[in-house]
Amino acid sequence: MSSRHDWTVLTTLLLTVLLVYVVAPQQAASQTFNVGQPVTPAAVKDWGVNISPSGDGLPAGGATAIEGRRIYQQRCARCHGINGTEGPDSVLVGGQGSLASEVASKTVGSYWPLATTLWDYINRAMPFDQPGVLAADEVYGSVAYVLYLNGIIDESERMDAMTVPKLQMPNRNGFVPDPRPDVD
C-alpha cells in the first residue's frame, strides 16, 4: 500500500516538473497566449461614443451653462471645487496666459486646444468614481459650465453637436499637428 502511495506522489512530482520546466517555457515563448478573443469593430463600438476632434460622433442633445451648473455642483464640485479653482483634484479654471510662465497652469481655459476633447473626456472618464454614467445632455451641460467658468462662453450659450466643434479654445494653436496619415 505504501509503494502505491509513493508511486502516486512520484508521478505527480514528475508531471509537475515536466509542466514547470518543459511545457510552461514553450507557452511563454509563443507569440500568442490563446487568451480572450480578437476585438471586432462591433465590440469597439460598444465601448462607447468615439468623438473625433472635428466633432464626428457627438450625440444629439445639448445644454447651457445655466443647465450645467446643477450637474456640475452634484457631480464635479466635490473634486474640482464649486468654482473649478480648488479641490483635491485638477483645477479646471484659470491659468490663462500661464503656459509660457515659470508656473504653468494646465486648465481647460489655458491648456485644452479643443472643446470636442473636453466633451469626450468628461463623457468617458467623469465623474471619477462612476465614469461614463452621465447622459449626453449632462455632458453638454458640464462642458458648458466649465467653459463658462473659464470665460470662454456666455452662461446662456448652448453647447451641442453643432456648437462644440466650432468653439475656439484659447490654446487652439498651442499644439503641433501630428503629420501621421492615420491620425485625424
Image: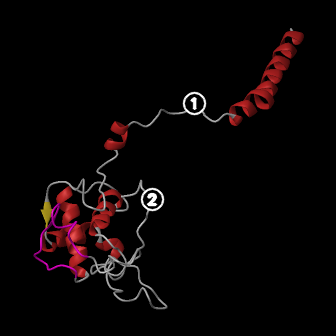
Disc 2/disc 1 C-alpha distance (Å): 32 Å
Q: Quadrant of residue 170?
A: bottom left
Number of callouts:
2
Q: In the displayed structure, would residue 172 be above or below residue 5?
A: below
In the image, is 128 to the left or to the right of 21? left
In the image, is 171 to the left or to the right of 156? right
Q: Which mark is residue 34?
A: 1
Amino acid carrying mark 1 in the image: Asn
Queried whether the magenta region covers residue 159, the answer comes back as: yes
Q: Quadrant of residue 126?
A: bottom left
Disc 1, SS: loop
Residue that lies at the very extreme toward the right in this rendered image? 3
Between residues 27 and 135, which one lies in front from this camera angle? 27
- Report x, y in % for residue 178: 43, 65
Q: In the displayed structure, would residue 85 be above or below residue 137?
A: below
Amino acid carrying mark 2 in the image: Arg
Q: Quadrant of the N terminus?
A: top right
Queried whether the magenta region covers residue 127, the answer comes back as: no
User: Residue drawn 28% across and 51% down?
Assistant: 49
In the image, is 57 to the left or to the right of 5? left
Disc 2, SS: loop
| Residue on which the image places disc 2 | 180
Q: Identify the main secondary structure in magenta.
A: loop
Callout 2 crowding tier (Cα within 10 Å): few <14, some 14–19, many ≥20: few
The tag earlier along the polypeptide, 2 or 1, is 1
